[in-house]
Amino acid sequence: KMRSIQDTFREDGVVVVKNVLSPDSIREARQGLHETLFTKAGVSAENLEETGGGLASLSSTGGAGGVLDIFYPPWKLKLLEDARMWDVVTSLWEASYAAGDDPIFAHTFGPFDPHRGYAYVDRLCFRVPDRISDLHSAGGGSGSGRGRG
């Protein structure tokens, strides 16, 4: 028997939902991300050996875990506003944080209506291969080289 996405999320804490975004949406988001990385930190996704050290400047954690403080660029907001993405998010909220019936998913302000439009903008993750991270941690390439961007 196949588990629902809600059951998978509640049990595993993560779920992959295939085919939510169209290939065009994914392509636009990738292009937007690459432009944002280059504009804000001089990072070229095509040349991380030379420019990947700049990722640390985009992170309040110094690049640890690939977490970057990129919140509101138009390409990211467009993804978050996609109707199919919204359906998945509200479904997951409904089965977890909004329900208020499981301490693991306790929300500071208690249960809430998962179908109401709440802001769920968060940082993003941009992982690089270990060899790129190690190169910049050792001071190679350009940029500060802090962390594992």
Image (cartoon, rainbow, N blue to C red):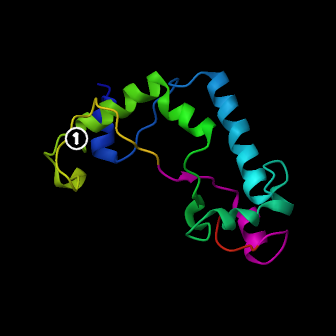
Which residue is drawn at the image coordinates 61% and 71% (left, top)? 62
Looking at the picture, does residue 32 appear above or below residue 142? above
- Which quadrant of the figure contains the N terminus? top left
- Mark 1: which secondary structure? loop
- Which quadrant of the figure contains the C terminus? bottom right
Q: Position of residue 125 (x, y in %)?
A: 57, 53
Residue lying farthest to the bottom in this orientation: 138
**Residue tagged 1:** 98
Q: Horizontal placement of 132 versus 85: left or right?
A: right
Q: From the viewer's side, name the closer residue of 65 and 99.
A: 99
Q: Amino acid at mark 1?
A: Ala
Residue 131 seen in the current view: no
Looking at the picture, does residue 13 appear above or below residue 31? below
Q: Position of residue 116 (x, y in %)?
A: 29, 31
Residue lying farthest to the left in this orientation: 101
Which residue is drawn at the image coordinates 81% and 52% (left, top)? 44
Give the residues in magenta. Answer: 122-143
